Image (cartoon, grey):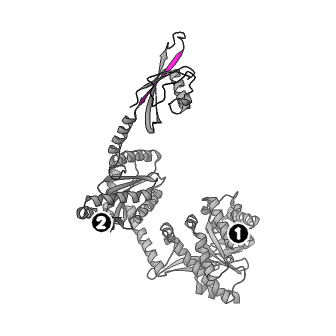
Amino acid sequence: MIPDLGIIFDEQARYIESYGASNELQCNSLSNEQRISSLPLGDPNKVISIITKTLKTEQVQLYEYELNCMGNRHIFEARTSIINNYLLDEPNKKHVLWMIRDITERKLAEEQVKELVFYDPLTTLPNRRMLTDTLELMISESKKQLSFGTLLFLDLNDFKRINDSLGHVIGDEVLLEVAMRLKTVIKNAGIIARIGGDEFVILPKHLSSNKNNAQSQAIVCAKQILDCFKNPFKINNCSYKITVSIGISFIEGPDTTSNDVLKRADTAMYSAKKFGGHRFAFYDPALQHELDLRLQLESDIITAIKEKQFAAYFQPQLDCQGNIIAAEALIRWIHPIKGIISPYYFIPVAEQSGLIDQLQSTVLFDACMLIKTLEQTQQLHDSFCVAINISACQFITHSLYNNIVSIVDAFGISPTRFKLEITESILLDDMAENIAQMQQLKAKGFRFSIDDFGTGYSSLAYIHTYPVDELKIDKSFIDKIHEGNRGSAIVSTITSLAHNLGFNVIAEGVETAEQAKTLAQLNITGMQGYYMAYPMPAAEFISWLKQQLNS
């Protein structure tokens, strides 16, 4: 160990002399002109500030820093103190004694103790003690912010069988692989702890302002964990199928303790095991019931896709003279027992479960079939197009262009036959990326319409920067069009805005002749609603269109 070294500085932080110099720190031949930047003291600016503070406060200052000495990393502790009357010929001047001690061995020992106290020796993951400390901090933060967090409790299914039949060496290899897979899923988004045997805990870092968001984030995390266990564990040229059960509890309420959160998650985990394992369960009974219904609906959607129970219905869009100008393709679930199921019931689940692209493909396929049929029978004018709803999550995956173009190109249909309806919320997220995607589709020939315009948060200051062709006025405004001047004023304002920006404007949800008459007076581009026609299957739409053209 390098012996202690003392360095004397004057009031201007200039080097005076040193004591106990060592070869390792290269302090044997220092001169009075020695600059602080050349001394083995770490950051020179930090050194000067510590010397200044020592002189100002006349109190001892401590400072730790690292140096590379003789090719090895060393940690030093510096301690400063005031020296009066150091120079006999200048007794009024103050000096600072800078004492250096090598504390490398002590620090390494402290780190080893910390490893033993706070980390699991097998996986090097945080252990129960560290998890509890972190959880208590998060609970405290949750109470201050009135926010919500979650904790996921994981248990390997039938792990005891592996330990008993194959031995603890193989069991330990499995646990190491589990830790590695969890790290790839969680990354920096939370803490992974091994709290005993085959039990792991995931504690996401971020708190949510409401419980629904916390629940959604926990579901996404749980699904990712289940997915990472799909592939077999390959150890010593053998494959082992490992599954996991996950229990989820909430961090909420003023009286919650870390023990409460862990016990609830543990209880929920056993609930997941009871239902067959390799699934997740919430402790909250009400949320668990809701989750069970959602998971069942997700399973039903997958079955319905395989059995081709989904189809597009088409609702006409007419101009003010009653001529058809377009049609909107709307997804419908034709259930063999329940009949037609509303998209409001299944679309949110399809979006959250990653099934929306398959439903989108069904709608686009049916729309292409309709257009192809109408072109062959010469029932279409050049400007007719079909509106297709685009989900916000399709923009996030960046697969929108390829998914749409591949189907349209396969049918040999011009993209100008389609307008893609997006909601205002899409415009608010990642503007640059979304504009780039829209421009790519626009260059191909697709048109864009903003659906439910006026109900979101679009800024008139930037809406013109998007490659948009049409605004679609939400039904809620059409319903109020005859509720005094304010009702019609909103529709009139949106219509004027659209025309000034060079956009078409469509009113949706038109249900009465009076509404249609008022909208015609406002010089609207087109109307859509039950007053004109209900959404229809493709065959019925073709018959309806033929009748309209002949009348």
Judging depth in this view, the residue of 474 and 498 nearest the camera is 498
For residue 94: magenta?
yes
Label at residue 274: 2
Name which residue lies at 32% across and 61% down: 156
Please give the count of numbered marks on the rendered protein. Answer: 2
Q: What is the distance, in whole Å, between disc 1 and disc 2 at their CAs?
A: 54 Å
Label at residue 469: 1
Q: In this orientation, does residue 257 appear?
A: no
Q: Amino acid at mark 2?
A: Lys
Q: Amino acid at mark 1?
A: Asp
Q: Quadrant of residue 5?
A: top left
Residue range highlighted in magenta: 93-102
User: Is residue 272 toward the left or the right of residue 28 in the image?
Assistant: left
Judging depth in this view, the residue of 197 and 373 nearest the camera is 197
> Quick one: label 1 or label 2, which is nearer the N terminus?
2
Judging depth in this view, the residue of 258 and 37 nearest the camera is 37
Q: Do the CB atoms of the residues marked 1 and 2 lie less than 8 Å apart?
A: no
